[in-house]
Amino acid sequence: MEVTIAKSLLNTSLRESEMAEVVMSSGCQRGIVFENNKLKKVGAAYSESIGLRVIKAGKVGVAATNDLRKVSQLVGKAVDVSGFGPLAQFEFPGKSKFGDVKTCSSSLLKFSNKDLVKLGEEMVNEFQEFDSKLLCFIEFNISQGESIILNSSGLEIANDSTRFGFGVYTDLVRAGDMLVVEEGQASCKADIDFVFYLDRLKQKINNARTVVKIKSGQYPVVFTPSSLGTILAYLYTALSGKNVVKGSSRLQGQLGKEVFDPRLTIIDDGLIDWKTGSTCVDAEGVPVGKLPLIQQGIVSNYYYDLQSAAQAGVASTGHGSRGLTSALGHPGLHNIQANAGEEAYVSILSGIEQGILAEEFIGMGQDNPFNGDFSLNLNLGYKIEKGKIVGRVKDTMIAGNAFELLAKGIRAISKEREWVGGSALYPYVVLEPVSVVSKGDTIN
Amino acid sequence: MIDRLSDLISQYKHQVDYCEIRLEESEGTEIRFRGRDIESISQPLSRGGCVRALYKGRWGFVSFNDLDGLKGKIEEAISLAKLGHGEKVELGDVEPIVDQVAVSYQKDPREVPLGEKVALFDHYIQQIWELSPKVSDAAVGYFDANTQVTLISSDGSCLVQEFADIYAGFTIIARQGEIVQTTLLTVADPLDYRIVLGLDDRISERGEMAVRLLEAKPVAGGSYPVVINQELTGSFIHEAFGHLSEADFVYENENLRKMMKIGKPVAVKGLNVFDDPTLVGGNGSYQYDAEGVPAKKTHLIKGGVLTGRLHSRETAGKMGEELTGNARVASYRSRPLVRMSNTYVNSGETSFQEMVEDIKLGVYAVGSIGGQTDREMFTFAAKWGYMIRDGELAELVRDVKLSGNVFETLNNIQAIGDDLKMHPSWCGKGGQVVPTSSGGPHLRIKNVVIGGQ
C-alpha cells in the first residue's frame, strides 16, 4: 500500500477545508469451499480503497472510492457534499498512546490452499465415517488486511491484521423434516480446534435425531454461548451511545443504576490477543481499550463514536465504526465478554425438571430492536426432562423480554465459557420464565 | 476494451472448461438521516472486476479493484480451478449473446441536483417529527446507483448491461416510557425517481401507526387461522417456498431432489406461483442474468403442483433441465448464485371480506419486516396485525411473528385473494444481497403458529 497517496490526499484536502482525515486500506483474502462432500470453489479477492472526510465551515463532507485512479476527484466531491453535511461536533483525534495487541499472524499466512484442501478432505472423511448419508459443506478463509488513518490533528496510525475463518454445516433430511446444523469459529491465527467443532456438530446431530413434543407454557430455557448473543444484542443496542443521544435507548438515564441481576457483568475489550474484534485503534483513530458496560448488574458505561460522544458531552470510548462512504461513525463493539458464574454446566442441566435447551434460532433481527421483546423460532432446540436432553422440539417459538429476563429471570450462569465467532466470550445462561408456543398444541 | 478482453479470454479458453471476465463500474448517491439530522451524503465511485474459471467441476474465482494485470488474474483463477481434480461439469447450453442493454429511465435520478434530493428528504424528516410528540427517533435513507457491467465469456458471449437502483427507506420510532415501537416504509423503482416524490401521506400513515402501536397489546401466542396481506404473502412465498425452488439447493442432494420432484403436488389446488425477471420496472428485473442467459418467466407452482425451479447454467446442466436465467450476483466481489427475481402468488377469486367473515378468532397480519428460513421451517415478522373476532377486524396488535413448516402451510391455504400487489424487497443468500420483489394477493391460512408471551 502506498502511504504517499494518502499523505498527498490529506495535504491537498487541507487547502480547501479546515480539518481532514484519510483512511486507506488494502487486503487480500483466499478461501476454499466444499459443497456436498466435494471441493467446489477456490477463490481469491484483492481489495483496495481510500476514503476522505473533511470538515469545512463546520460541516462534514465525505468521499470514497476503490478506484485509485480517481483519488484526485475525492477532494472536490467531499467539499461539494460538505455543504449539505452534518455539523461536526467533534474534532479528529491527535496522536496518542495505543495499546498493544496481537492481530497479525505470519504463520497463518503460510497455510497454503493445498493445506486447506487436505484439512477439508480429512473432515469430509471423518464425517462420512460418522454417517455416510450426510452431505457436508465446509468453508475456510484466510485473509490479511492493512489500513492506515491519517488526519489533520497529526495522527498517523497503521493497523494490520490476519484472520482465519472456518465453518461447517450439514443438512439433515428425512421424510417431512429438514434441518441445517452448523458450527464455526474465527481467529486471527491458526489456533482453531477443528476436532472440537466437528465433535460438537456430531453431538448436535445425535441430539436432533429424536423429535419430541412440548406443551406450550412457561419454561426455563438454557441459552448456549452461541444462542445467548441473540438475547444480549438488545442490551448492546440500548447501550449504544448513538441510540442514547437519539432517545431510542431503553437504558437511557440508567447509568450507575442496578438495572440487571447482580450476577451479570459484561465487558468489552479490544485488546485481547488473536481475537477477531481486537484492534488498537477504532475506525476514527481513537485508541481502543477495555470498557465495562454492565458491572454486577449496574449500567456502568455506554459506548460511543466521536460524534455521539460529543453530543453526549463525553469522550469517544474508542468504539467508532464507519463505512468509508459515511460522514459520521456509529458505535460498534470489539470483543464482548460476559462473566462466568459458579455452577458447572452439567449440574445446571441436571437441575432442570422440564425446559428447553436453545442452540440455534431463525428470525433474529426481526423483532423491535429497542423494546427488548423477542420472539424466536427455535430452529434447533431440545427438550430437557428431569435433567436430560430427550430430543429435538420442532415448530416451536420462544418469547420474552430480554431486559426483564436479565433483571429478574436469571436462574443460573455456568462457570464454563466459550468463544463465539472469534469475538464474544459467553457462558451458558438459564433464563426463566420464557414463553414457549409449540404447534400441535392448538388453542383454536 | 471489449476487443482486448475477448482476445484475452480466447488466449486462455483452451486451458479450462469455461471462463469469464466480469467488469463493473458504478456511480451513485447515498443520503442518510438519523434523528433530526443528516448523517451522511456521499457519491461513491466504484470499480472492480472478477475472473471465474471452471475446470473439472471446480470453480476458481478471483476478484479485484485494480484492473491492471488482467492476464495475471486470469492465470490465477485458472490455477485455483486446477487445485486437484474433480469430475467434469456440463454447463447448460446457451447461445452466445452479443448485446448492449441500456436502462430506459422514466425519470433519471442523475438529472436531479443533489441539493434538491437533500431538501426533499429534509422535508420528510421534518414531517416525521411534526407527526406526534411521541415520535422519538427516525432513520431515513435514500440510495440511487447506476452500474455498468461487462461480461465476456469463453462461450463467445459479450454483454454490456446497465443496471439501475432507486430506493428510499423510512424507519419511524415512537416511544412512551419504556415502550418503543417502530414502523417502516420502503419504496423502490429502478427506473423512476418519481417513486420517492410525494410520500407525505404514506409517511404520515406509517408514523401514526407507530404511535398507535404504543397502545397496542402484543398478540397472544398460539395457533390461529390467519389472513396475511399482499406484502406478507410475498414475503412468505419468497422465504418459505422460493428458496427451496433454487436448484443449487437440491441439485446434488438425492433426498432433496425427491422432496422437490417436478410433478409433485405441494400446495392446495388453486395455487399458482411465478418467478418473472422480465416484469417492467420490477425491483428484481433484468434482461440477462449474470451468466448472460436471457431472463424468462418460470411457473414454479401450477395449480398446486410443482412445475418448475430456478437455475444457473451449472444446475440446469447437471439436472438436465431448461435454463431459466436466474444466476445473479450482488457485485464483482461475488460469484453467481441461483436467485429469485420478482416472485409472486397469482390472484385467486376470494375477496378480503369473504376471507374474514367466517373466522371466529384469528389474526390479520399486515406487512413484512423480514423473513428467514431454514429449509422447511420459516419465520416472518409482520409490521402489525389486527385480531379477527366474529368475522370482523378488531383491535390492533403488535409483535406478530408467524412461523411454520412450508409444505404444511402451503396445504393449509384456505382462500386466495383477488388482489395481487408487488412490493420491493432485498434478498440475502451466501453473503450476497440482491434486489428482488415479491407479492401476491391476500391469503387465508389455517393453523399458523404465532409466537408471543
Image: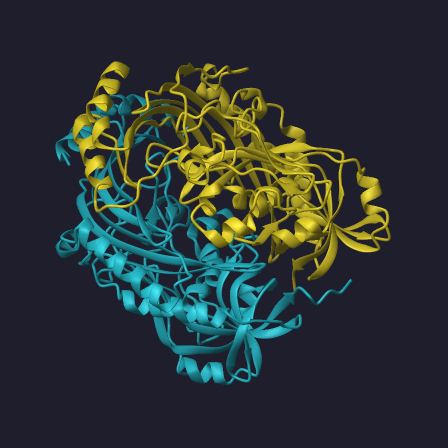
Chain colours: A cyan, B yellow
Does residue B101 lie above or below B348 as drawn? above
Query: In which quarter of the view is residue A267 placed?
Result: bottom left
Q: Position of residue B70 (x, y in %)?
A: 20, 27
Q: Is residue A423 visible?
A: yes
Query: In which quarter of the view is residue B75 placed?
Result: top left
**Residue displayed at 54% across by 42% down:** B245
Q: Please name whichever residue, B300 or A322, is drawn nearer the observer in this view of the structure.
A: B300
Q: Position of residue A374 (x, y in %)?
A: 57, 59
Does residue A337 lie above or below B296 as drawn? below
Q: Position of residue B154 (x, y in %)?
A: 29, 25
**Residue displayed at 67% across by 58% down:** B449
Numbered disc total: 0
Quadrant, the N terminus of chain A: top left
**Residue displayed at 36% across by 58% down:** A168
Relative horizontal placement of residue B215, taking residue B192 as reference (left or right): right
Quadrant, the C terminus of chain A: bottom right
Q: Please name whichever residue, A320 or B343, is drawn nearer the observer in this view of the structure.
A: B343
Q: Position of residue B207 (x, y in %)?
A: 64, 40
Relative horizontal placement of residue A232, taking residue A79 as reference (left or right): right
Q: Please name whichever residue, B138 or A386, is drawn nearer the observer in this view of the structure.
A: A386
Relative horizontal placement of residue A178, taking residue B220 as reference (left or right): left
Q: Is residue A15 visible?
A: no
